[in-house]
Amino acid sequence: MSNKTIKSALISVFSKDGLEPIVKELNKQGVTIYSTGGTETFIKNLGIDVVPVEDVTSYPSILGGRVKTLHPKVFGGILNRQNHDGDVKEMKDFDIPQIDVVIVDLYPFEKTVASGASNQDIIEKIDIGGISLIRAAAKNYADVICVSSVDDYAEFLELITDKKGNLSEADRKAFAAKAFNVSSHYDSAIFNYFNADQTIPALKISETNGKVLRYGENPHQKGFFYGDFDALFTQLHGKELSYNNLLDVDAAVNLIQEFKGEKPTFAVLKHNNACGFAQRDTVLQAYVDALAGDPVSAFGGVLISNTQIDEACAAEIHKLFCEVVIAPGFTAEAEAILKGKKNRILLVLKDTDFAPTTVRTCLNGVLVQDKNNKTDQIEDLTYVTNSKPSNDAIDDLIFASKICKHTKSNTIVLVKNKQLCASGTGQTSRVDALNQAIHKAVSFNFDLKDSVMASDAFFPFPDCVEIAGNAGITSVIQPGGSIKDQLSIDYCNDNNIAMVMTGTRHFKH
């Protein structure tokens, strides 16, 4: 691999942050600098000589700045092969200057879209010259180094300073990879803006924030996380989150969002399912009653609250070994207590929008769907039995339905007085899910008399309502839709059980 010493550079950037020391170092090394527009003015104001690109092309910036660098003398200077006799001759014949470095920072397209700007403003932030310069310089990494983002300015400065501008092909290739990462992400963002209505059946996902995890689901599997974790959380304490931690945190956050703005609500999750859940007047009592749902499974679990965790609650949590505690905030006293365990992860959940779709690999492709944003409400209920649930029972039914929606199918959720008594999760039959839930509730000394039951899908036979009635359950919420719904309704009528239907299934596979 050959080393090449930088003798010339083309600089045309949107962000000038961090550019000054680079320009000064290049000037110190005797590098000829070419530039355009605002970048050219910036360099001149530093008292450093700069050659305007229009002096090379004999064309001014035209069309309101839309065309500045798109010219054979610019792209010839970037794309020529320095060991190719034909290219060397043409460079001389057409008086094309060699360009060894291209420094570009693109127009902020994604930020402009996110700001709610007008369509015209967004269109003007589609970079043409910059993206072309990046692709050309990265393609010709054998001779040219491409700095494609303000995020790479510091690394580039360190490189040219340490090596006095004499860079290896490995250096140039590494920056070329960064450049194509920038260009592909940029084009994906533009496509997704134009294809917002999904007229074109194509999937473009690009995440430029990534980190290597300790391992994947198991120690023999590699694991990675791609996304802006810091946009959702502030980590106050603890070790790095693992692959499984992240899955549990995702499940916890999506569940607690159902109770945003409500009375203090606390959840304990294990393997992506709530094993404890309660809503009370204080966060302490919500935690205590959530833990009572399954204090065995809670060991090593993920805890989440919809409200600030105070000192009293933290003191109780501190008695439990748990991996992660999440809340919108912690009092100073609570934070100090919970930091008493070295590896316990403390996360402050920010008020942030979540992705509108879910994505998962399937076979040799990918499955994409709208996120399940439907939450059952009182106004959605159809009262199908002679017996109607009381107002308190209706509150419990909606409460149970929200938990059920976020529990692996097939699932049954049992609730009494805004407390999760038990759930049957991930079973191959709904009867098994119900029997599991009842067995678990009884084992933790819950009295199921006058409790309520939620099901994520309809009952194909009346066996579930019969088992539920025998356990003391008096109210049921389910989507309905079975051709044999009437059998379940008839059993409820004959046994004084109230049943409501929502019309919405909540499978979670």
Image (cartoon, rainbow, N blue to C red):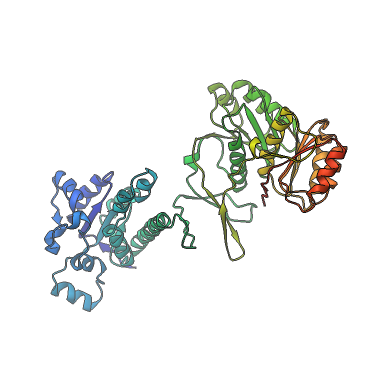
Q: Quadrant of the N terminus?
A: bottom left
Write down the quadrant of residue 187 in the picture.
Answer: bottom left
Image location (x, y in percent) of residue 473:
82, 35
Image location (x, y in percent) of residue 160:
28, 53
394 with respect to 99 (left or right): right
Q: Is residue 192 visible?
A: yes
Q: Residue at (40%, 60%) from the top-left corner? A: 184
| Residue situated in front as seen by the camera: 127 or 453 | 453
The furthest residue to the front: 386
Image location (x, y in percent) of residue 18:
28, 44
| Residue situated in front as seen by the camera: 480 or 261 | 480
Image location (x, y in percent) of residue 39:
20, 49
Q: Residue at (79%, 41%) from the top-left corner? A: 437
| Residue situated in front as seen by the camera: 210 or 411 | 411
429 with respect to 258 (left or right): right
Query: Number of callouts in the render?
Result: 0
156 with respect to 49 (left or right): right
| Residue situated in front as seen by the camera: 488 or 156 | 488
Write down the quadrant of residue 132 in the picture.
Answer: bottom left
The furthest residue to the bottom: 86
Q: Is residue 32 visible?
A: no
Q: Residue at (20%, 65%) from the top-left corner? A: 71
Quick check: 162 above or below 452? below
Quick check: 334 above or below 188? above
